[in-house]
Image (cartoon, grey):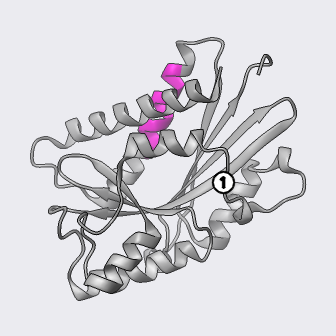
Amino acid sequence: MSLYEISEIVREAVEQSVKEIFKDYGPNRRLQEEEVTAKLEIAIKKNIEIRNGNNPGFEIKTTIFNKQIEETTLGADLAVFFKLESHNNCICKVFLSQAKRCLLIDNCISSSNDVKRAKKQAKKMLGITSDSFFFIYTPEWIYVCPALEALFSLKEYGKLSFSFISFKRIENFFSDFVKCFVGDIRPLDRSDILNKFRDEDVNEFLGKNKIPRALLITAKLRDSL
């Protein structure tokens, strides 16, 4: 398995997951942030495992973590960890995300209370890692934008608008994140990097940073690489 093949598995799994979720909600798609995030986490795990099962040579697995966290303390509501192993070496990285429902892409967040809250959430996430993002749940699809750009838009224009930020479809974002050769590992800075992202590390990270959900994707490249 190559890094590109792994990224394609993840991309296809995420795309299929969004299709399934949107089908469940029907044409009106009144998406509730917390509910969609929970469904998305479960669906991605299922669809990665289906693709892994269809390809016996693939070594890729997912683990879900959930914690009871009080809503008012949240910065991120999901952490996604990725660990790529090959020949006793590995790339370990994590990104944080906060979900936002958006009916109009040019005016996603505009009320004073919502803007204030989103700015606070962005600052909390960026205080942990620069790899922080907003998941934008629209009636058409789920998009991803950098928290830093979102924060700028909220401060400069008083709203979150697709006219002022960079964004990607969520499946392309996941694929690009997997393919990227680098990542910010400061959130779980350990000297024994091969043991990084153990279950106890992830649980400790969630509790410390008050994040209710996490998805751990672990992949191994074949020996020929």
Q: Quadrant of the C terminus?
A: top right
Q: Main secondary structure of the magenta part?
A: helix
> What is the x, y in percent for residue 95?
57, 57
Name the residue carrying label 1. 183
Task: Judge left or right: residue 99 versus residue 133.
Answer: left
Magenta highlight on residue 158: no
Q: Quadrant of residue 101?
A: bottom left
Say what secondary structure mark 1 lies in. Answer: loop
Magenta stretch bounds: 41-51
Q: Is residue 2 above or below residue 172?
A: above
> What is the x, y in percent for residue 128?
62, 72
Q: Is residue 37 above or below residue 23?
A: below
Q: Nearer the viewer, residue 164 or 100?
A: 164
- Tally of numbered tags: 1
Task: Judge left or right: residue 190 versus residue 205.
Answer: right
Residue drawn where x is 72% and y is 48% of the image: 92
